[in-house]
Image (cartoon, rainbow, N blue to C red):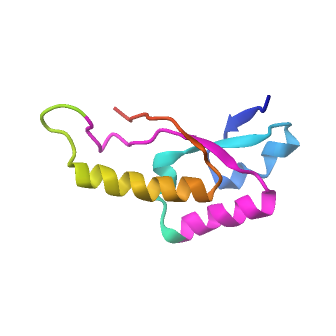
C-alpha cells in the first residue's frame, strides 16, 4: 500500500519523502489555474524531488456551477478541465476526484 499526503504548495514537496510518504495529492484547480511560470516551477520541483502527484482533488472552484439553470457553459468547463487534466497528468496524476468549491 502507498501512503500519500495532500501537500498543497510545491515549496513543501521536498518534505514528503523525508516524512515517509510515497506520493503527493495535488489541488486540481490550483494546477489548472497556475500561470505557465508557476506550472513550470511545479514541474521543476517534481523533477528535482522525484515526487509524483499521483492524485488530484478539488477539481472545480466555486466559480463553476455544474448543475442547475445557471450552470457554467460546457465550453468553459471543458476548456478548464482539459487544461487541468493535461497538467495533472504531466505531474504524474492518474486519479482525479471530482469536487467543487460550492
Q: Quadrant of the N terminus?
A: top right
Which residue is pictured at 39% across the width and 42% down the height? 60
Q: Does 15 sit left or right of 101 as displayed? A: right
Closer-to-camera residue (30/97): 97
Q: Is residue 30 above or below residue 62?
A: below
Occupied quadrant, residue 101: top left
Q: Nearer the viewer, residue 3 or 45?
A: 3
**How many numbered marks, from 0 up?**
0
The C terminus lies in which quarter of the figure? top left
Q: Position of residue 20 (x, y in %)?
A: 86, 36
Q: Is residue 63 above or below residue 88?
A: above
Whether residue 68 sits left or right of residue 89 in the image: it is left
Query: At 65% across and 64% down in the image, what residue appears?
Result: 43
Q: Position of residue 92 (x, y in %)?
A: 65, 52
Which corner quadrant of the image does residue 8 belong to?
top right
Q: Is residue 45 magenta?
A: yes
Toward the left, the furthest residue is 69
x then y, percent, for residue 3: 76, 32
Q: Position of residue 94 (x, y in %)?
A: 60, 44
The magenta region covers 37-66
Amino acid at each position: 500500500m502507498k501512503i500519500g499526503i495532500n501537500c498543497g504548495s510545491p515549496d513543501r514537496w521536498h518534505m514528503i519523502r523525508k516524512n515517509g510518504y510515497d506520493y503527493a495529492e495535488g489541488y486540481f484547480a490550483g494546477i489548472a489555474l497556475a500561470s505557465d511560470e508557476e506550472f513550470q516551477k511545479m514541474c521543476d520541483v517534481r523533477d528535482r524531488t522525484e515526487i509524483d502527484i499521483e492524485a488530484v482533488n478539488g477539481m472545480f472552484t466555486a466559480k463553476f456551477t455544474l448543475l442547475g439553470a445557471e450552470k457554467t457553459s460546457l465550453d468553459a468547463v471543458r476548456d478548464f478541465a482539459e487544461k487541468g487534466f493535461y497538467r495533472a497528468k504531466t505531474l504524474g496524476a492518474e486519479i482525479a476526484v471530482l469536487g467543487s468549491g460550492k
